[in-house]
Amino acid sequence: MIKTWHLGDSRQSMVLASFDGRLPEVVYWGPALPEGEAHQAIAAASIADVSGGMVDRNAAVSLSPEASQTFPGHCGLSVRDKNGTQLAPDSRFRSEAVSEHGVTLVFADDALGLTLTFNLALDAKSSLFKLRSSLESADEIIVDWLAAPVLPVPAHTGEMIEFSGRWCAEFLTRRIPFAPGARVRDNRTGRTDHAHFPGLIVCSPGTRNTSGEAYAFHYGWSGGHKMVAEELQDGRRHVQFGHASGSLPVGRTFHSAPLYVTYSGSGLNGAATRFQKHARNLVAEGARSPRPVHYNCWEAVYFDHELDELRSIASQAADLGAERFVLDDGWFGRRDDDTTSLGDWVIDRRKYPDGLTPLIEHVKALGMEFGIWFEPEMINEDSDLYRSHPDWVLGPADQIRGRQQLVLDMSRQDVRSYLYEHIASVLKHHDVGYIKWDHNRVLPVVDASQAEGTYALIDRLRADFPQVEIESCASGGGRIDFGILERTQRVWLSDSNDALERQRIQHDAALFLPASVTGSHVGPRKCHTSGRVLDIKLRSWTAAQRHMGFEMDPRELTEQEAATLRMVTGWWKANRDWMMQADILRLDSSDPAIIAEQQLAADGSRFVAFAAQMRPSDQILPYPLQLTGLDPNAVYKINLINQDEAPALSRGAPLLKEHDLEVSGQYLMSHGLILPWRFPETIWVLEGRRL
Ligand code: DGJ
């Protein structure tokens, strides 16, 4: 007997089948199937042959491949009884509940007292599937691995793009071939981490940003994930995501985080724009609109908080166009450097004798919102909190410190209450609209209840202070995922304010993140994390590609630099309403020295394209820049808004250097735009309007 289920929309279909009551398997995932397609036939047609050297029936790549079915690879569930004896569940169909966009399927092994539930739904707004597994047990058990619903990927794909990175170089991508065996990523840092963004894109060798097939995955969890991308010895391939190994405490109920997946037939951009849209939808309710221009004082003053100096910086920031002033690390306890005071969330009266109100009033009088930094989950040994509660620390006493700090055990109610009271007190007694929530070290032990405890604390604060936005920061981009974005409204993408590095990081992060949640700041002339000196134009336009802000000491700006920054900020404000809702389309630049993207308005009526010359090109003449996502039959008016930046060495007369161009979408996408020659470490900005 075959039972089938179908999920999908006009872009993609997923067909699941259960044979003889066994666990369901995805028998089709790809382009949308025609209305009325016979799903039973597709299920029946999915049965593969059996040949020499094989068992007599192929174990299914089910939503949770089972050892009891002789599955020849990584199983979807690895579970032991309390004494450590391995269990091999053999689950059978129990029930189903079908809703408009989803289905809940329940399977059980009654003899072992184990029930597996799969929640599968299509988010109609973003066209992402949201898939989740849960396990319930009659007895206490040890779960070593619970995969979110496991998905097969087709043989014709063959490659995967996975993510690594480091501090100041988040979202590094690596494109590697599928090969027999398993590619396993196990992030045991206890946080999402710079080095382990929980994403994967399975694609064909020819897939580019603008064309080809892609199967994209993101695990929405902040506690560290494990991924398995495996090619079995029989040739079948599958992908699994779940919590990092060893992170689930002994218990009776277990859940995976949601796994978000989508199929795109229109290149990496087809998948990227759906993730971007979903992230925009997640933060839509809590995020201030329009998105305010930030000023963050970290790289201006670090721990040296001096009221008059901060007031003067705030005034200059407002004059440059800032609309939100964020007071970073250093305002509490006796925090003169990073060795002390985490946990003591009381205002440092040495630095602020009359509290924070004089600074806040100054900021408000300038028309800016006030934001403040916390690192709630952390504690220094040199703190009153540690002296009174050394037992609140997570992990062993002799653990290696990270940035000289320890971590609070967020699974404890008393720890969460303490943090709630102290953060709430600052919010209640001051006019605060924003929290920058930091997390500057990896955990000493991997434990899912740590991330769950943090989620609970943020949820409580958001419920009681819904007007306070939260930014997720973890030494830059160490905690970026859809789990944290369900409860925060912005991410600090990287501690690197180096515009060239930022171009690369932003470009790759756009495979999942929209502009509206991605913080990007104009840093100091000489970058504090790279030592590189970059021009204000490149720095300003790079920040203007995302949620814009400034982070330098404004006193270092020359008049000319301030004028450029003011101009670009003014441009950003004039365009942010549509840009923050736009799709970021990564362009396939023929020149590897150029990183280019196009931000296309939701109604297709306008766009802006940025082409950053990262280094000198190998060839002298700039290659035409091909655009994407346009109506081939419509005419667009193009203008190069910073055409006056062409240097003297650009001696010719390409049209865009002096004139606007009116031309079809077909020409723009097929031939592309000829731009003037320019120096490395500079950027062209093009505006387009549909006529
Ligand atoms: C790390 C963050 O990423 C920085 O932006 C800054 O907030 C520091 N922590 C403060 O300690």
Image (cartoon, helix red, strand yellow):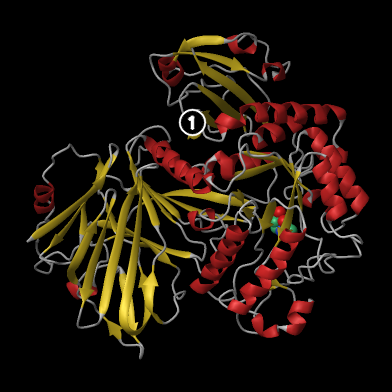
Determine if residue 618 is in view: no
Determine if residue 487 is in view: yes
Q: Quadrant of residue 138?
A: bottom left
Q: Is residue 22 left or right of residue 362?
A: left
Q: For the residue carrying disc 1, how many other residues have a C-alpha within 10 Å: few (<14), some (14-19), or many (20+)?
A: many
Q: Quadrant of the N terminus?
A: bottom left
Please state the quadrant of the image where ligand 1 appears: bottom right
Vertical order, 514 against 102 (above or below): above
Picture residue at 46% right of the left edge, 64% below the top: 225
Q: Quadrant of residue 85?
A: bottom left
**Residue beneath disc 1:** 587
Q: Is residue 669 left or right of residue 577?
A: left
Vertical order, 363 against 635 (above or below): below
| In-front residue for pair 311/87 | 311
The residue sitting at the left extreme is 1
Rendering coords of residue 50 (x, y %): 9, 61
Mark 1 residue type? Leu
Q: Is residue 494 left or right of residue 277?
A: right
Rendering coords of residue 534 (x, y %): 74, 36
Rendering coords of residue 535 (x, y %): 75, 33
Picture residue at 65% right of the left edge, 26% below the top: 574
| In-front residue for pair 284/633 | 284
